[in-house]
Amino acid sequence: MKDNKLFMAIIGPMRLPFLVLVPVCVILGTASAKWTGFQIDLLYLSLAFVGALSAHISVNALNEYDDFKSGLDMITSRTPFSGGSGTLPSMPGRSVIVLITGLISLAVTMLVGIYFIYKRGIWILPLGILGVADILLYTRWLTKNPFLCLIAPGLGFGLMVLGTDFVLTGAYSSTSIFVSMVPFFMVSNLLLLNQFPDAKADETIGRHHLPITMGRRASVFVFAAFIFCAYLTVAFGIVVGVIPLAGLLALLTVVAAVPTISGAYKFADDIPKLVSYMGKNVLVTLLTPLLLAVGLFLA
């Protein structure tokens, strides 16, 4: 029984269903490198995936730890997409295990980064510094500023795309910058909509994200603008020639994005009805960069 609780204390805060974002971003970075003419080094690709996965595990676990310590977990109504994993409220004595999980995962990411600095040079270091800062500062500090809280999640996953492309190519490219903007906008949006159910609870512990400062319904306009910016990035990238015409595949998700925006606006203050649109938003967030990667590979 003790072993089972220890296992759950480690696995639960990792939020395994949410980790699917990592392979999507790594695939997109790989597709970017492939389309620009580089052969794929499987060792480098595998290490990039390990570093990205451990980074996501780290931010999930550290967020879980901080939310428990602040008391937020005790006053939040959980949904399938928000409110934490529920691990620590059910086993409060295991909080140190969650903290250790987050720190060890971060250490793995940093070791992978040091390896690539040695192999690819110092120019990958800015990505590493930004990524580590994003992980360590997000829950305690960045969530207190509406703008930083909005962009921080997307920044982390955009960096995954850029980092994957860089370790495979040894340089930054216009293509990698453009395609990294798609998960930047989409993942920022994912977290934005997922903050709607937690707004009242978050406010009590001093957070100041958009649904708190602007209200849920007004925040939907930012949500819609970010989706538009993601599609506009793809279209503009095609026009200037840094994304192939097959990248238009990414725009297919507009058929799900439009009703998601409409539903988010209509049910912004009706959380039980909003949940299904939060699910649709997850699909749009995953499928848009994945379809863009397919377009790059096909080209």
Image (cartoon, helix red, strand yellow):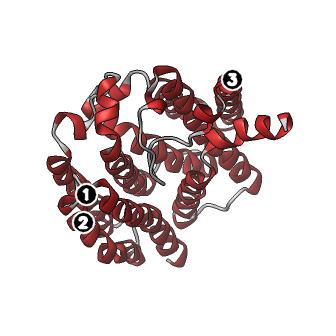
Quick one: SS at disc 2?
helix
Q: Are marks 2 and 3 in contact (CB under 8 Å)?
A: no
Vertical comparison of 59 with 242: above or below: above
Number of marks in the image?
A: 3
Vertical placement of 67 versus 79: above or below? above
Question: Residue 96's spot in the image, x, y percent?
Answer: 68, 21
Q: Which one is in front in this view, the residue at disc 2 or the one at disc 3?
A: 3
Amino acid type, label 2: Gly
**Residue wearing tag 3:** 93
- Closer to the camera, 60 or 152? 60
Q: Which residue is mark 2?
A: 263
Does the residue at mark 1 contact the one at mark 2 (Cβ under 8 Å)? no
Question: Where does label 1 land, which residue?
Answer: 229
Using the image as rendered, state which of residue 282 and residue 287 is in the foreground. 282
What distance separates the C-alpha of mark 2 from that of mark 3? 40 Å
Q: In screen coordinates, is 30 left or right of 267? A: right
Name the residue rendered at 25%, 55% in the picture: 270
Using the rendered view, name the quadrant where residue 149 is placed. Answer: top left
Disc 3 residue type?
Answer: Gly
Query: Mark 1, residues whose alpha carbon is within 10 Å: few (<14), some, or many (≥20)?
Result: some
Q: Which mark is residue 118?
A: none
Q: Residues within 10 Å of mark 3 (few under 14, many from 20)?
A: few
Q: Residues within 10 Å of mark 2 (few under 14, many from 20)?
A: some
Measure how far apart labels 1 and 2 are at the Cα level: 19 Å
Q: Secondary structure at mark 1?
A: helix
